[in-house]
Amino acid sequence: MLDNVSEIEASIRKSCIRATHFIGSDKKFIYGTGIDDEDYQWEIEDFKANYPHTWWTIEQIIYND
């Protein structure tokens, strides 16, 4: 369903913390840029383990034509 999605803009909410991230994936890694312009790369399982009990809200889906 999301094969043509290039990137998403998502907000993270954890307790009183809220930040925006731009996130993309090649189905092996998750790539992104945080609000501080810090780039990151995670293996998908490591990303899940690093953000347990975290609420993500997708703000915008960016399509790749």
Image (cartoon, helix red, strand yellow):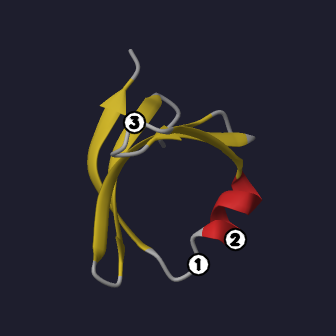
Q: Position of residue 19 (x, y in %)?
A: 31, 59
Q: CA distance from mark 3 to mark 1?
A: 23 Å
Circle 1 crowding by C-alpha within 10 Å: few under 14, some 14–19, many from 20: few
View extreme (left): residue: 59
Q: Which residue is mark 2?
A: 49
Position of residue 46 in the picture relative to residue 65 (left or right): right
Disc 2 versus disc 3: nearer the observer: 3
In the figure, 65 relative to 42: above or below? Answer: above
Q: Position of residue 37 (x, y in %)?
A: 39, 36
Q: Residue at x 33, y 31 (%)?
A: 62
Marked residue nearer the N-terminal end (2 or 3): 3
For disc 3, the marked residue is 37
Label 1 belongs to which residue? 52
Residue 39: x and y in percent read 53, 35
Sequence-wise first label, 3 or 1: 3
Quadrant of residue 6 within the rendered picture: top left
Q: Nearer the viewer, residue 25 or 65?
A: 25
Which residue is depicted at the point 41% across and 20% down? 64
Mark 2 lies on a secondary structure that is helix
Quarter-of-image position of residue 51: bottom right
Identify the residue at horizontal 38%, vertical 15% (top origin). Answer: 65
Are the residues tagged 2 and 1 within 8 Å (C-beta)?
yes
The CA span between labels 2 and 1 is: 6 Å
- Classify residue 47 as left or right of residue 7: right
Q: How many marks?
A: 3
Secondary structure found at label 1: loop
Left/right of residue 12 with respect to residue 3 in the rendered view: left
